[in-house]
Amino acid sequence: MAAPARTASDAPALRASGLSRRFGARVALRDVGFAVSPGELVAVIGPNGAGKTTLLSILAGIQSPDAGAVERPSGGVGWVPQQPALYSKLSVAENLRLFARLERVADPEAAVERMLAQADLADRARDEVGRLSGGNRQRVNIAIGLLADPAVLLLDEPSTALDPRQRERLWDFVGGLTGRGTGIVYSTHIVQEAERYADRVLVLADGELIFTGTPRELEAESGASGVDFEAAFVRFLHERGH
Amino acid sequence: MRWLLLKDLQILRRSPLLVGLLVVYPVAIAVLIGVALSRSPEKPKVAFVNQVPPAASTFKLGGQEIDASKYAERLFESVEPVRVGTREQAIEKVRDGEALGALIVPPDITEKLGTGLQSAEVEVIYNNEDPVKGRYVEQIINSRLADANAALADKLREIAVQDIHLLLDGGELSLFGRTYDILGLRRTERILQDALRTLPADSPERERLRQVERFASLAVANLNLATDVVGTVSQPVRVKRTPLQGKRTPLDSFAVAIAVTVSLMFVTVLLASGMLALEREEHAFSRLVRGLVSRMGLLAEKVGLAALCAWVVALAMTCGIGLFVSLDWSRFGLWLVALAFAAAGFGALGVAIGGLAREVRAASLLAFLLSLPIAFLALVPSGAVSGGVYDVVRVVSALFPFKPALDAMDSALNDTGQSLLGPLAHLTALTAAFMVVARLALRRFG
């Protein structure tokens, strides 16, 4: 049973404005603002320690910003942490069922069946999560984030620790979600994934949002020609002193 | 919260090693304590040389025959005698380690006792190779010899009192195979008084008879006191036992309270800390507290889970011990209440530990490292350390749930004469305090 596709509209599914966050003397985020449209796939890229996870945590409501605000959609925001947040002693179906109940989904069993089919895990439903491969665990992790059928899904470095084939399957799965109108925001340190899959990239460096635009626009902004996207991205950061 | 509780029970069900330990641990402890408390301690072996000829094991004192072997049996209530024929053989047994000590009874012991004038002597040889056992044997032999001495002294006192009564009231006395009729001082006094009445007032015999009659009266009065004096001499110091603070717990029952409290502490603290740390280890914590469950709700669920499991385990353990040791089953309702409050206190301590640790292993290690000294401190008796140190020990013990939990279990299991309400109120306050500590510690979870 597939969830009905959302109607694309110009109204943002998620909007963040003026987000700032400090950890003691260190500034993790400084005045970050952007919006996500329904069905849009937005990549957040930047060097290590740029504030990507902090930004996603604030968007997910796990952390509170010191300043700024997040307008979340009425359908809620799905959250997929970097590490699979699953109980390894429970089966795939039991994990889904538990979180469906905790999310107070109207029909938990139907939601479990839907996500098993969507994540292509129906044949592994009774397997303990601890016995699954990293790729399958990540699919269960994402499926849990989608149980409540959120308007926006936040993924923190979803492809980390996956092999190339598993990554391909993951992005096929995520692509299917945007096709149904779910807005996706994901962080990644694999910049090729941003080039290949994202509609728009946000570049964070030292807590500041220093670029918003398409991958092609980022390449053009870097002024590099005849180099790959990763080299253009590195050059872009160097030019801005990062 | 019930879904989380069911989830945790499901995880526990799928952790056979952990559940096995939770079941085996209290059963093993219950059986060990039960067997230990229901069996007497193993008797140490002592080489025993009795050089008294069998025919001479009895002696006569004050016309009564006393069997010395009856008093020797008292010694064997606490030691296992290894009977040998000579002193050299006894020493050999001690040297070889077959016996921890030797007791040598010389041939003239009954003869000396029979005189009623000489002290008899026995020889005791110790093996101090193991100082603890050596000390134990020394104390046992000394204690039992003191018992035998006291029993003999009682017998001698009894004979002395009989002789005094014979002197006072008269009767038959057997001596050297002949029986003599003893007049007795009271009868002598009466005869003298009768004689004085029949004598003429101016009889010269009257004054001499009056002197003898006064002597008889004085002797009767003083010998009446002599029976009490003899009793006092045989036991100059008596012990009057007055327990302070009104506790009347037998040692066995207190040992049961300690065993149950220690088990309850370990099961609850380990479960609560481990299950909370597991949420972090499985990375589920951030997902849960995104509005699915409050942090305080999560803590309450972990405390409830650990307390419930430990409550069942500790109750089973108490009932198991009850098969070996006499417990007051009419207080069963109080056991349930005390166990519940104690489990809640330990559960709150457990989540505070689980909040500080990020992994299950770290939480378990921290739980052990913290629980053991808390239990030991709570068992330090007053007088074992200096007054200042004991005050510190009391304060530290009051800050953790073990001491009030032990007091609650002791009051519930035994009629200690102390109210259960005090320890329960203490446990309630500690539960609340450790929940606050745990909530603050959860900030580290992110």
Image: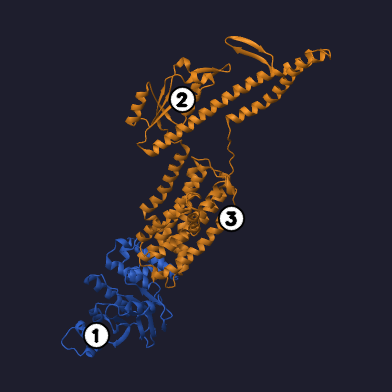
Expressed as whole percent of the image width and height from the top left, the position of residue B55 reads 47, 14
CA gap between label 1 and label 2 equals 102 Å
Judge whether B203 appears above or below A46 on screen.
Answer: above
Residues marked 2 and 3, same chain? yes
Residue A210's label in the rendered image is: none
- The mark lying in front, picked from 2 and 3, is 2
In the foreground, A120 or B128:
B128
Point out the residue furthest to the right here. Answer: B201
Residue B421's label in the rendered image is: 3
- Give the residue displayed 55% in from the left and 53% down from the top: B337
Residues marked 1 and 2, same chain? no
Q: Secondary structure at mark 1?
A: helix
Q: In the figure, residue B4 lies in which quadrant?
A: bottom left
Q: Kindly indicate whether the residue at mark 3 contacts the one at mark 2 (C-beta within 8 angstroms).
A: no
Expressed as whole percent of the image width and height from the top left, the position of residue A16 reads 38, 84
- The mark lying in front, picked from 3 and 1, is 3
CA gap between label 3 and label 1 equals 68 Å
Kind of residue at disc 3: Leu
Look at chain A in the picture and name its colour.
Answer: blue
Kind of residue at disc 1: Leu
Q: Which residue is mark 2?
A: B121
- The mark lying in front, picked from 1 and 2, is 2
